[in-house]
Each structure stands twice: as C-alpha cells, then as structure tokens.
Image (cartoon, grey):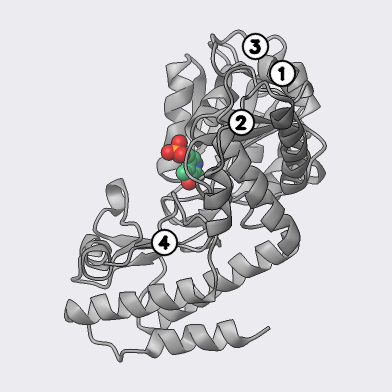
C-alpha cells in the first residue's frame, strides 16, 4: 500500500532533504560542519525574521519549550499561561515541574485567547515574569493573536513574551523582531519538513538580560552555553549533524520559494481544505481564527472522528490525525504545512469523501474535490 503522511507532525520530507541527509556523517567539530552551521544560523534568522541568536538543540520541540522555562525563570516566579489546548497544557506542566507558579488563562478549545485577558492579568499582577502561549494550537487548529499579545507584553519591562511556534514558524507570518517576541520555539518535524529531532529557539536581548539571574536548574538545555558555542559555529554537545544537513537543504528550498510565497502557499492550501470540508456539510472545529497549519474538522453528528482517522489510514494509507483528549472521536485533523502542495489537498479531500461515504454519510463524491480545485486553480 502506498503511504501518505498528512499529519500535523511529523510531516512529509522532500526527496531533496532525504537525499541530503543520506550523505556520510560529518564530524561536528570539523571545519566543514562549522561552515554549514554558519549558513544555517543565518538562514534561521531569515526564517524567524530576527537578528537574535537562534539556538539549535538536539531534541524535539518540547525540549525547546522546557529550556524556555528553565533558562528564564526561577522557582517561585510567576508565569501567565494561555491554555487553549493540549500544547497550552504542556506549558503548565513544564512550569509546574520547575516550581514556577502559573496563572492560567483557560481558553475554551476551539477559541483564540483575547489580548484583553492578557492585559488585565498583567495589570492585576505586575510580578508576572513571562507570558507563555502557542502561535498555532495544533490540537484545536486555532491560531492565537501573537502580534497583539506581544504589543501588550512589551510594555512590561520584566515580562517575557514566550511563543511556542512549533507548528507556526514557516507556515504563517511570525515577525520575531518587529513584534518584539522574546523567546520563540520551533521544531524540525512540522513546517520545516524534516524528521523529528531538532528544536530551534530564538532569544531576544531582553530575554538574555532577564535570564541572567534565573535560578531554575538546568544542564543539557543551558541556553547560555549553547549561545557561546554557536558564536563559534558549534553546538555545546554533539550536534544532530544529519538533521542539520537536512535543515540546511530545507531552508535553502524555502529561501528559493520566498517566505511570503511559503505563507501564501500554506494559506491557500488551508483555505481550500476548509472550504472543501464545509462544502460536504462538515463543520470546522475552530470557532474563530483557524490556523493555516492544520485543519481540524468535526466529525458529523453520529459519526466517529476516530473512525475517519482510522479508515483513512487502513483503507487508503493516509496518516492524518484524530483528536486528542476531549476531542478524541469528535474531530480529525489534516496538516497544511511543510512539503505540501495542491495534490496533497486533493488527495486528503478525496479520501475524506470516500471514507465518509463508506461510513454511510450522505454526500455526492467529488463535491469537496471540486470546491478545492476551484480555489487551487486561482492564482
Ligand atoms: C508538535 C508541537 C510541539 C512539540 O512537540 P514534540 O512532540 O516535542 O515535537 C509543541 N507545540 C506545538 C504547538 C506542536 O504542534
């Protein structure tokens, strides 16, 4: 059976990237690797739209998230956490593991946080040292208003804006410097279309300043140490060399396409997916601000979303995603990020139609495909 990967991480890897990673292993202290890292360092600044150092860690995105708590806060410090899904919850759990007190802004799943809530919380409690949020909450398919939140946070001299952009960086516009984002985390296996195993973290001067006195314990994820190594085009420990070779290739391809074109492509694919799903009578799970990274679709009444996910895989070899936690059985999710194009959407929509038809859901085959084609035909 031919396999298709349309999950919101890991995502498909291009043949170019796969081949680049098949080359013999470079030694991480060899000059060839240093010059590669120098280029990747510059390209990451381009991707993050920043002049900041972007650290490269051998871990998944969660390692970057953990380091963003341990390097900038002390036990007993207070963090304001936006919890609108599975990944918002993860910020809470990391903070709690480090003895960081949290004030939670609980956002109903399917909704985006309102910047006014952040403003009110920061006014109520000026001791808050950081606002932790997702740019794209992958579990619900919602994008939070990062730019607006950052505008509020930057008024507070001793409070950092920390963004989990793991499923957003390289999908839609995240202007690290222009918006004043202090810590921005991404991972390799989403929009960068690499295998899992790298986290990348951009850190502002404000964050370095506040982090200088942070007392949380840390060893492997020691950002200061990584920064010093990076200044010499090295990583503190053995670099994930093959993944960084792949990252070099992936960033090269994104640069050839152009950042705005990457955003436009993902936006168009996501739009086509959403309209196709609506045209066959399905509802999108996000009630507002749908993210272009992943389309979360509600299973129709009386149908099991987990069955849709399972049938896609078992009958047609397509790995999408089901729902997590409270959404299990209620939704299925299709990624629109990374190495994806027109026919990934067509494939996904056609297969969803076939699966639903097989489950007894009334629809005219080709309806959603036609709608997607109309959108994708337009320039
Ligand atoms: C995938 C993802 C992560 C990182 O998860 P890992 O399993 O550690 O790679 C973090 N945040 C969001 C929003 C994600 O989509």
Estimate the spatial distance between the alpha carbons at disc 3 and disc 4, rounded to whole Å. 40 Å
> Horizontal placement of 305 versus 229: left or right?
left
The disc placed on residue 26 is 2
Lower position in the chain sequence, tag 3 or tag 4: 4
Alpha-carbon span between mark 2 and mark 4: 31 Å
Crowd around label 3: few <14 · some 14–19 · many ≥20 (10 Å): some
Residue to which mark 1 is pinned: 229
- Packing grade of label 1 (10 A; few <14, some 14-19, many >=20) is some
Q: Which is nearer the N-term, disc 2 or disc 3?
A: 2
Front label number (2 vs 3)? 2
Earlier residue among tags 3 and 1 = 3
Tags 2 and 1 touching, CB below 8 Å: no
Disc 3 on helix, strand or loop?
loop
Which quadrant is home to the N terminus?
A: bottom left
Q: Where is 242 relative to 285, above or below?
A: above
Answer few, some or many: residues within 10 Å of disc 2's Cα (few below 14, many 20 plus, some between 14 and 19): some
Camera-side residue of 215 and 112: 215
Viewer-side label of 2, 1: 2
Separation of marks 2 and 1 at Cα, in angstroms: 18 Å
Who comes first in sequence, dot 1 or dot 4? 4
């Amino acid at each position: 059976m031919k396999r298709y990967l349309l999950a919101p991480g890991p995502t498909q890897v291009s043949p170019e990237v796969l081949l680049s990673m098949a080359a013999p292993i470079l030694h991480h202290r060899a000059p060839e690797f240093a010059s590669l890292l120098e280029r990747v360092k510059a390209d990451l600044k381009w991707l993050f739209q920043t002049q900041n150092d972007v650290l490269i860690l051998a871990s998944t995105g969660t390692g970057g998230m953990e380091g963003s708590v341990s390097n900038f806060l002390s036990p007993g410090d207070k963090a304001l956490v936006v919890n609108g899904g599975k990944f918002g919850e993860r910020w809470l759990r990391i903070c709690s593991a480090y003895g960081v007190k949290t004030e939670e802004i609980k956002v109903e799943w399917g909704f985006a946080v309102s910047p006014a809530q952040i403003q009110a919380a920061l006014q109520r409690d000026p001791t808050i040292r950081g606002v932790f949020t997702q740019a794209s909450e992958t579990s619900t398919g919602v994008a939070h208003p990062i730019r607006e939140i950052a505008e509020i946070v930057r008024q507070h001299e001793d409070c950092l804006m920390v963004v989990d952009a793991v499923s957003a960086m390289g999908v839609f516009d995240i202007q690290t410097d222009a918006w004043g984002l202090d810590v921005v985390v991404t991972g390799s296996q989403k929009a960068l279309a690499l295998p899992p195993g790298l986290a990348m973290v951009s850190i502002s001067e404000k964050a370095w300043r506040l982090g200088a006195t942070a007392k949380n314990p840390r060893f492997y994820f020691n950002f200061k140490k990584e920064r010093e190594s990076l200044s010499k085009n090295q990583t503190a420990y053995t670099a994930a060399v093959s993944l960084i070779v792949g990252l070099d290739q992936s960033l090269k391809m994104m640069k050839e396409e152009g950042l705005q074109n990457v955003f436009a492509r993902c936006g168009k694919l996501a739009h086509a997916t959403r309209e196709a799903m609506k045209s066959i009578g399905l509802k999108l799970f996000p009630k507002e601000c749908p993210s272009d990274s992943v389309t979360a679709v509600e299973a129709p009444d009386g149908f099991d979303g987990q069955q849709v996910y399972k049938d896609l895989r078992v009958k047609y070899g397509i790995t999408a995603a089901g729902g997590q936690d409270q959404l299990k059985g209620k939704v299925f999710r299709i990624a629109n990020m990374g190495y994806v194009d027109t026919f990934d959407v067509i494939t996904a929509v056609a297969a969803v139609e076939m699966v639903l038809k097989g489950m007894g859901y009334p629809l005219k085959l080709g309806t959603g495909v036609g709608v997607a084609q109309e959108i994708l035909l337009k320039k």
